[in-house]
Image (cartoon, rainbow, N blue to C red):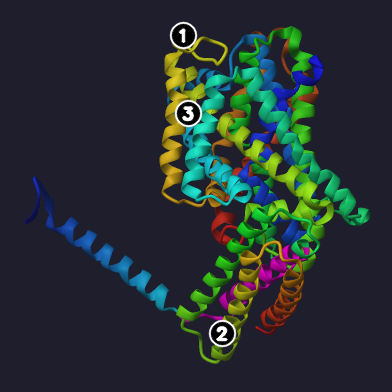
Amino acid sequence: VKKVFGVALGVLSAIGGFVDIGDLVFTTQAGAKFGFQLIWAVIIGVVGIVVYAEMSGRVAAVTGRPVIDVVRQRLGFGAGLFTLVGSVMLSFLTLAAEIGGLALVMELFFDAPYSTLVLISVVLLTAAAWVFPFEWIERIFGYMGLCLLVYVVAAVDLSPDWSAVGSGLVPSAPDHSLPVYAYFAVGLIAAALMPYEVYFYSSGGVEERWTPKDLRLNRLNSVLGFGLGGVMSIALIMVAAQVWHPLGVQPDLIGTVALGANVPLGEVGLLLALIGIAFAVGGAAIDTAFSAAYNLSQFFGWEWGKYRERRQAPRFTLAWLTAFAMAYVVVSTGVDPIMLTEYAVVFSVVALPLTYFPVLLVSRDRAFMGKYANGRVSSFFGWLYLAVILVVALAAVPLLIATNAGGG
Amino acid sequence: MTVREGPHEVPLVVFRALAALAAGLVMVLALAACEPLGPEELQREVESIESVAAEGSVLGDRIAAQETKRTFARVQARELADAADHSAQRLTDAHPAEGLTPQVERAIRLAEGVSGQVGSLEVAPDAAASAQGAASELRSLAARAKELAESL
């Protein structure tokens, strides 16, 4: 049981990256537009985030320093501040979207006015973050979010053409519009590598007081947690490829994602999907609120951590409370939460190199990490993925504009 | 020479440049709004109508089979009906390019038909028999929308 609970951090961090409100719709759109053809992009993203989450967790366990601390140390104050501003803005925008997303899911349960549900969502999330200790937050949201594994059952139950699924493991020429295909590929890779995942993950490692003795747990968390996130993403693509692709449906609504599980598995499938989506989106909201507060506190040297008494880390507490309050104001303007996260994913890629490059530098530095520094395999994958990240960062915004955000 | 604006003085050349820029932006926006609806844009709109109709038929099937949640069906049907209404409104407001008027009118009728059928699911999200009829009608509307989109 202890081992099962031990991977909750990885699961919750992955949920923030793979199945938040925007990703659920974006991934379903990818399957609806291109069938199984984009599964490879999810796999590229999963391997990348496993590599970098493992590195950032290892740095946190060995040195007690989370990612933004490392960024500031290696890049200096100016570039560090730039990364901080970008990452906090991104976390904040995503938080606003997740709050709106949770309200949308609750609307599907209760059919109450959206504005009321937005208020209820923010109150519930703030209360959960206030009342529960860190371990319970990650367990409740992480494991309840695993209800989304219903999509794995649905994907298999629909009897997919496994040879077509296999073909999706490697890039292939799309049926139509190469730029749109490239836009979705870049978006899926970027979603897996969202920077706030490693900020949250490495800070979580410090919250759980990891030491070098926990390096196996770190590896298990990064592989199993983010691996599960990837499995859920692939399942979403497979369900959309089988339910929506043949009908020419363009999924724009979170209800369409839930209906995908309803078709093969009936009411039980629908309920599990809605519960999974609610907890995944709620978990992503807490991920992002804490990420913003962690980064601000760590950058400016304030006391931080959920494991501390609130009066021992007052500015950290104030930071995440403020993030929730400001996000509520933003989402109350009526902005579309799904579009907000989709744009956030694409724009986040510009901040990716500034987040991941310093992690790579520190994790391979023997003077800093001693015998726990990267081996050849870690370094190889680290550099390889840095190259992938740079390509993605350069391509994202032009593709967003050229394809009218995937609309063609 | 300067232009007085509140407590600050703005150089006239800057003022003129800003005014010209603002006027240019207004003109670009106005021209974009008046640009006629071409076949590609119409095709995208018709594909959206096809998408709503197809999804509505799937939802109707779930209601007919009594295999969905009532509240979910009602909210989702409402969202889909709204999407079809917006398509109809956008097409009604658009200025079709030469020769496209009959296709635009056909698309508007399709969008209105989809909105009506999906709207019936919203009104009675647990009426199995009428949902079956609506699902069947929505499948037919989706097929007609597809045919229209492919002809463009």
| SS at badge 3 | helix
| SS at badge 1 | helix
Q: Residue at x 50, y 40 (%)?
A: A96
Residue range corresponding to the magenta coloring: B36-61
Q: Which residue is mark 2?
A: B104
Image quadrant assignment for residue A223: top right
Q: Amino acid at mark 2?
A: Val
Q: For the residues marked 2 and 3, what is the alpha-carbon distance in whole angstroms?
A: 50 Å
Q: Is residue A189 above or below residue A216?
A: below
Residue A243 location in percent, x, y?
79, 60
Q: Amino acid at mark 1?
A: Gln
Image quadrant assignment for residue A180: bottom right
Q: For the residues marked 1 and 3, what is the alpha-carbon distance in whole angstroms?
A: 23 Å
For label 1, count other residues whose C-alpha is less than 10 Å away and answer few (under 14), some (14-19) or many (20+).
Answer: some
Front position in the image: B87 or A211 = B87
Residue A63 location in percent, x, y?
63, 10
Q: Which residue is mark 1?
A: A312
Left-right relation of B123 to A213 = left
Q: Which residue is mark 3?
A: A84
Is residue B146 visible to us here? yes
Chain at numbered mark 1: A
- Give the mark, 1 or 3, whose residue is nearer the N terminus: 3
Q: Residue at x 91, y 57 (%)?
A: A161
Is residue A38 visible to us here? no
Residue B73 location in percent, x, y?
67, 58
Left-right relation of A249 to A315 = right
Chain at numbered mark 2: B
Residue A354 location in percent, x, y?
55, 31
Q: Residues at marks 2 and 3, common chain?
A: no
- Circles 1 and 2: CB distance less than 8 Å? no
